[in-house]
Amino acid sequence: MADFHFLRPLWLLLLLMVPVLYLVLKRKGSGDSGWSSLIPEQLLSPVIRRYGGASKKSGSRLFPAISAVVILAVALAGPAWREAPTPLKKPGDSLVIVLDLSLSMLATDLEPDRLTRAKRKIRDILAIREGGLTGLVVYSGDAHVVTPLTDDSSTLTGMLNVLDPVIMPVQGNRSDLAVAKARTLLEQGAPGKGRILLITDGVSDRYTVPISEALTSTGFTLSTLAAGTRDGGPIPLARRGFIRDGGSIVIVRTDPDMLAELARTNGGTSHELTLDDSDITSLSLSPEESDEWQDADSGLTINRWKDDGYWLLWLALPLLLLGWRRGAFTAMALILLPAIPQPAAAMDWGSLWQREDQRAAELIKQDASAAAELLKSPEWRGSALYKAERYEEAANVFSATESALADYNRGNALARADKLEEALKAYDSALNRNPELEDARVNRQLVEDLLKKQEENSSQDQDGDDQDDGDQDEGDQSDSDSSGGNGQQQSDDSESSGENQSQDGSQSPQNSDGEPEQPQEQGQSGDQEESGQESSEDASQSGDSNATGAEPSSEKAQTPTPVSETPLTQSQEQSLRRIPDNPGGLLQRKFLQQYQERQTPSDKGDTPW
């Protein structure tokens, strides 16, 4: 019992109710209900003596009631004295932080500058998201991934120190490219809901529409954190003074209202950068606030104190029934009725106050799969299944209703399910019911064009296969004709066989009888040795180490060098320590190589800061 303690000790304050309960029950047992001051004693005595709880039995309910309160207080306090292994949990939400690394982030309207304050805030976010998946993307004239989604916050924290506008290969403010890059990271298997946090001092109006289009139909939300003030500040450069435009010092200002509008458009929230954690709380970046936790893939466990207070509830139950005997059967019914199996009935709180047609749209927007189980109307249930990408089920549900709109929706679902011919029939049925349904006519034309294109591609693929078969037959015929009767080939035939071998990987040349040609042995004629050398060169180029005539030296060249397990000497370790650690230079070269490979076109309307 040395480890005995309470997990929730504040519940022990419930023990203060014991004296209050004692006084209440004692007063009630005395029979003085307050009527003695209004009713004469000779009239009140028979009534109290008959109905007012006999004094001899008043103490019978006092002890059980007080004991029940004490037991409940101890149970709720969570008594614990043993540990049990518990699987580790990790937050189910994924967050990609997009950091602006343009020159405007060096403005000094925030102390010491905007970029430093932003990096400090990222450290605070990583601290509260310990164990959650977080990625980092930076951008200026192009966007680059610093770290993909990871639960190793130390890696992200180590990279923050070297992030500076000078490591970017080109300057600019391409926030649209950064959001697209963040979306790609989330689409590569992010668990739970994906969120994007954009930390910047401004987004150009020319990029708001591409950002919204990039996040449409993805389910990812975009929140913004405004780094900067409305008054703005100049941009200092080391040993160069302030950035000037036409002789005037550039003053960069932040518009929090514009960033808030961008966040609202994409399902997120916005806040200005603060010194405390109020901005993090407002943006709900903590994994505890997301309430989506999943089992960790590592299989690790941790010992946690086990709450054994629930065992005391069985002891408190009969005491409660004894303390209030008149309500014993009612309490027993309330306890046992929920345990009796009953037919399942879909009922939730919202259905008590709103009709299905009033709440269906909101349910589908929140969770289409769950809405499909709650909604009963074929139109709304089919729409929920369609939104959940369960197209075949949606088509079956829409078929239960005979209307032009139902046929139109059924055609859309069938087209999404790649049943184009059935979709055409559904569109035809919709147009027969309502010839003025223009959307059905347009979609029917699109599906018909797609069906024709598939048929054309199928016929072209079949013609190509027939042509390939014909070419192969001709090639086989030419190979059989070019073989010599004595099993030896001329130089041209040897090169041809080497090319065929390099293409097939391990095909052996054949003689006129169609049998595989045997490997040539040492000591044969010079022509045979020359032919063997040529075939071995072709075989070595094709990567076949078992080809005829392969030389031992080529096999040795392909053998990987064994890794030395000899520990480093003290002088070698000292030499390695003298090598400067420059992760910023590595990132700079990495970003430059990516920019050169992508050849991202510059935006003429963008500013260099």
Image (cartoon, helix red, strand yellow):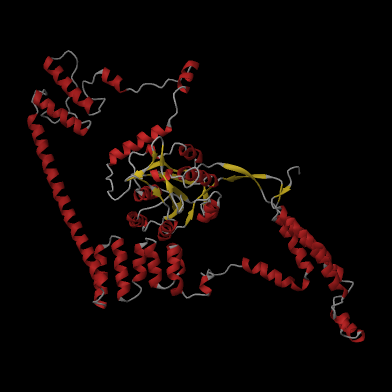
Residue that extends furthest to the right in the rendered view of this protein: 42
Query: Residue 238, located in which quarter of the rendered image?
Result: top left
Quadrant where the N terminus is found in the figure: top right
Q: Would residue 291 be visible to someone looking at this image?
A: no
Q: Residue at x 11, y 24 (%)?
A: 487
Residue at left offset 43%, top offset 66%: 364
Residue 306 in the image, given as x and y percentages of width and height: 66, 48
Viewer-closest of 195 and 369: 195
Q: Looking at the image, which residue is at 27% across and 17% down?
A: 553
Is residue 546 toward the left or the right of residue 514 in the image? right
Q: Quadrant of residue 12?
A: bottom right
Q: Hey, which quadrant is residue 46 in on the image?
A: bottom right
Image side of residue 302 versus residue 27, left or right: left
User: Which residue is painted at 19% across and 33% down in the image?
Assistant: 503
Q: Is residue 367 above or below residue 555?
A: below
Residue 256 image position (x, y, % from top left):
44, 56
- Left or right: residue 562 versus residue 295 is left
Asked whether 487 or 305 is in front, the reply is 305
Instruction: Work out which quarter of the rendered image holds the C terminus and state it.
Output: top left
Is 427 drawn above or below residue 253 in the view shown? below
- In the rendering, at what x and y percent does residue 466 appear? 13, 47
* Total numbered labels: 0
The answer to whether residue 449 is visible is yes
Please identify the residue farthest to the top as the structure is shown: 523
Q: Nearer the viewer, residue 222 or 42?
A: 222
Q: Residue 509: x percent and y percent?
A: 16, 28
